[in-house]
Image: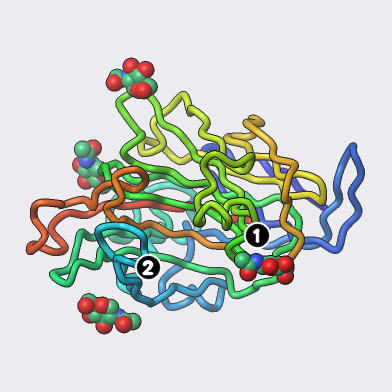
Amino acid sequence: MLFHHAVGALPWLLLAMSRFCDDAEYAVFTELMENDFLHTSTDTLSEVGWAPQVYNVTAANARGPYGKSMELENVITNPLKDSKAWSGDAEHGGDAGLELWVRGAHQDGLVSGAEVVSSRTDALLGSFRVGMKLSNSSGTCGAFFYYHNNSQEIDMEFLSRQFNESQGFVNLVLQTPESVEHGYDASGTSGFEVQRLPFRPDEKFHEYRFDWTKDRVSFYVDGTWLHEMTQNVPTEGGGLFFNHWSNGDPSWSAGPPGQGHRHDHLLHESLLQQHRHRA
Ligand SMILES: *[C@@H]1O[C@H](CO)[C@@H](O)[C@H](O)[C@H]1NC(C)=O
Ligand SMILES: *[C@@H]1O[C@H](CO)[C@@H](O)[C@H](O)[C@H]1NC(C)=O
Ligand SMILES: *[C@@H]1O[C@H](CO)[C@@H](O)[C@H](O)[C@H]1NC(C)=O
Ligand SMILES: *[C@@H]1O[C@H](CO)[C@@H](O)[C@H](O)[C@H]1NC(C)=O
């Protein structure tokens, strides 16, 4: 059963995974999972079903001028000071929520970034939702996605270079056998769509969502339908991911933040934040 709660000004993510029934009119999902990052601290992140990732990728494998270094210290919980409140001051300032930081390039040419993965890797069909506020520093990619393998992946990707004072874009992507044939590049396939957003994604939290049923993947922002894809719909269970990274590829993430200051690592930083998360 999919519950739709009104949560006032607070965004959240709903992850509904299913043993399910589904027809042209509606779908009923039978599992519900929710994370509330307004009230979650670092010590408990794995206990609440998420695993921060630690790994390095060389520039060659990252397919950009820079490699990537996903680091534990870049995943930071920042709960509300008052554990009974739903708004107010956060423990270390700024907005309350889970923070994923990109912190410029190390001297070895790896850009320090962040990734978290759900402990469950059996997400299969459902409505997946997150409240996110993207980075305001140009030159990173922030993503919310499901991943089984390189030909079964559903992504909502935000490139901070595509934001300006009045608007932004979201890149809607299915990685498919077709994108694998095109060198892991979905652009130019039916699994790639860039949608304009009538707001700056770095200014406030918004709800980003994809509904994945057997015959389609539909994408939504703040409950408004944006686009659907009906070819190469994934069929296998996988994990849910959030990441924030840069490899300096001018045609994608661009950046990294702090380029030209490569030796002052940690000087230039970029932040993606999540409030809540439900399933
Ligand atoms: C990744 O690279 C950084 C910077 O060179 C290094 O400090 C770190 O230990 C490496 N991490 C892993 C998981 O290999
Ligand atoms: C970007 O966001 C950070 C963190 O919220 C803030 O400190 C900084 O002033 C912002 N920068 C710009 C250019 O808006
Ligand atoms: C992904 O998984 C599917 C289903 O198991 C398989 O058919 C396909 O070959 C895999 N794709 C890649 C790129 O490994
Ligand atoms: C923001 O970008 C859009 C699309 O590229 C453009 O039409 C608009 O004029 C830009 N606005 C500002 C304030 O730069």
- In which quarter of the view is residue 243 placed? bottom left
Q: Which residue is mark 1?
A: 152
Residue situated in front as seen by the camera: 136 or 175: 175
Amino acid type of disc 1?
Gln
Q: Which label is found at residue 209?
A: none
| Circle 1 Cα neighbour tier, 10 Å, few/some/many (<14 / 14–19 / ≥20) | many
Count of residue discs: 2
Label 1 beta carbon less than 8 Å to ligand 3? yes
Q: Quadrant of ligand 2?
A: top left
Residue position for label 2: 61
Q: Nearer the viewer, residue 177 or 217?
A: 177
Is residue 105 rendered to the left or right of residue 142? Answer: left
Question: Is residue 238 visible to us here?
Answer: no
| Left or right of residue 87: residue 270 | left
Q: Quadrant of residue 199?
A: top left
User: What residue sits 53% from the left and 71% below the top?
Assistant: 50
* C-alpha span from label 1 to label 2: 19 Å
* SS class, disc 1: strand
How packed mark 2 is, by other alpha carbons closer than 10 Å (few <14, some 14-19, many 20 or more), is: few
For badge 2, the amino acid type reads Asn
Q: At which x and y percent is residue 48?
A: 56, 72
Residue 168 drawn at (x, y percent): 41, 31
Q: Residue at x 85, y 63 (%)?
A: 19
Q: Residue furthest front?
A: 181
Question: Of callouts 1 and 2, which one flags the residue occurring earlier in the amino acid sequence?
Answer: 2
Give the percent coordinates (x, y) of residue 274. Answer: 46, 53
